[in-house]
Amino acid sequence: MNNDDKNVPPQPGATASCSSHDFMVKLAFEKYMELTNLHQVLVKANRPNDAEKVLVAIETAKKEYETELAAEKKRNEEIEKGNDSILDHSLYMNTYIDIFRNELDMMTKGLLELKQNPGNIESVREIFEATHTLKGMSSTMGFEMVANLTLEMENLIEKLRSRQLVVTSQIIDLLFETVGVLLVLMNDIISRANSTVDLNVISKKLNEAATSNLPEKC
């Protein structure tokens, strides 16, 4: 699956009236969310092959949603020249927060297991999939700080998953620290506060760890 989300769509805009096209945008997004929830169930049920297939379906559903969203944006621009469409997160926010919490739980569970057994590649895979899901959902919802941080986290975990790096106690501690920052960002989103979190320090740590040439084994 392509891990590079460069063209991130915004959330569906609120329009003056409900049209068939608005409905199609919401339908596409709901399909994407349902597949994401199914993926979580399969991961928890320890069915990696089925989970991998659903990841492919999630990517297809995301592209369909982006296509519908682009058409909606164009329609809104035609209705209100020069005005940005108002973003309406209310329809999807509760589901997003539920997924956010679930993925953080999956990351924490995987990290605890990895701390006990640093060679457990299955735990690495679970952490990677939770990170990837949260990254995609955050990109779609327009939460760039979360999307950017999980992308950097994902890059490091991919190095572990592909065995380009070995798991170290320092890396585990760094990933726990990153999960803590994500928790703060989630609470900021819930409270609708303008986040004051400075990602520069944690981002630098993640990038340095991902490019480390001589990792030390636990």
Image (cartoon, rainbow, N blue to C red):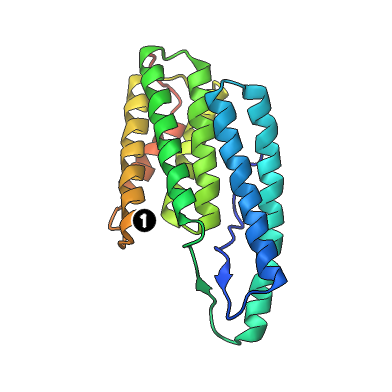
How dense is the environment of label 1, judged by Cα within 10 Å: few (below 14), some, or many (20 and up)?
Answer: some
Q: Amino acid at mark 1?
A: Ile
**Camera-nearest residue between 22 and 201:** 22
Q: Residue at x 48, y 62 (%)?
A: 89
Residue 3 visible in rendering: no
Q: Position of residue 213 (x, y in %)?
A: 46, 26
**Looking at the picture, does residue 127 appear above or below residue 166?**
below
Q: Position of residue 186 (x, y in %)?
A: 36, 49
Dot 1 lies on which element?
helix
Check the picture and name the quadrant holding the C terminus: top left
Q: Quadrant of residue 172?
A: top left
Q: Position of residue 171 (x, y in %)?
A: 37, 26
**Looking at the picture, does residue 181 appear above or below residue 39?**
below
Q: Residue at x 51, y 56 (%)?
A: 92
Looking at the image, the residue that sits furthest to the bottom is: 81
Check the picture and name the quadrant holding the N terminus: top right
Q: Residue at x 67, y 44 (%)?
A: 59
Tag count in the figure?
1
| Residue behind mark 1 | 189
